[in-house]
Amino acid sequence: MLDVVNASIRTVAAEGGEVLNVFGGRMVVKTDPAILGVFLAEHVVPPGYCVPPHIHAEDDEAFYILEGELTLIGDAGEQRIGPGATAELPARSRHGFRNDTGAPVRFLVALRPGLQGIEMFRHFDRAGRLTRGVLAPAEIAAICAEYGVALG
């Protein structure tokens, strides 16, 4: 028999969610990691968008490609993945990605547990609005470090 817990089902409409601008990439947050223990967002990145190699101390990360092709960067080299493909990026694995194509790439990004991840993306959104999207590399590295992410 299933025990019923007094909980509420939460839904987010297709067009709903918290919208963040992360270095020119549009991220729409779909889940609250404080409730589910996982961060899930739809991320759309323009041509030329690049996230350099980095390491998450705590968060496991996964991508699911919806549209376009994304180039993954890792210790074993580079790999391009397209619609329907999944990338699993365990905590403490060095990885990055970029859009080498002439069209936007739309994908789902999940982080578990995701509490540091969502706060880092919010921090980048706030900092980008204050600086009109131009952050010094040292400032980017400091923000990343605050949330357990090391660049390089």
Image: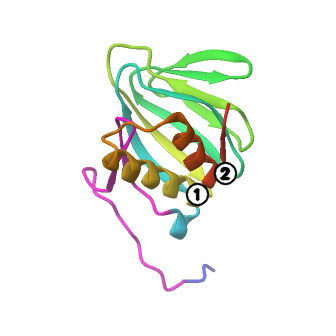
Q: Position of residue 62 (x, y in %)?
A: 58, 40
Query: Residue 18 or 124: which is nearer the viewer?
Result: 124
Question: Is 18 situated above or below 92?
Answer: below
Amino acid type shown at disc 2: Gly
* Bounds of the magenta segment: 5-32
Q: Classify residue 65 as left or right of residue 17.
A: right
Q: Which residue is located at x 57 percent, y 61 percent?
A: 115
Q: Earlier in the sequence, mark 2 or mark 1?
A: 1
**CA–CA distance in space, label 2 to label 1:** 7 Å
Residue at left offset 54%, top offset 26%: 97
Is 28 one of the magenta-colored residues?
A: yes
Find residue 49 and report its image quarter.
top left
Q: Secondary structure at mark 2?
A: loop
Q: Position of residue 146 (x, y in %)?
A: 61, 54
Q: Which residue is mark 2?
A: 148
Residue 29 visible from this viewpoint: no
The N terminus - image quarter: bottom right
Would residue 93 be seen by someone viewing this image from the given angle?
yes
Name the residue carrying label 1.
116
Name which residue type carries label 1. Answer: Gln
Residues packed near mark 1 inside 10 Å, few (<14), some (14 to 19) or many (20 plus): many
Dots 2, 1 in contact, CB < 8 A: yes
Q: Position of residue 149 (x, y in %)?
A: 64, 45
**Residue 114 rendering spot, x and y as whole percentages:** 57, 56
Picture quarter with the C terminus = top right
Which of the pair 11/118 is nearer the observer?
A: 118
Count of numbered circles in the view: 2
Colouring scheme applied when the structure was drawn: rainbow
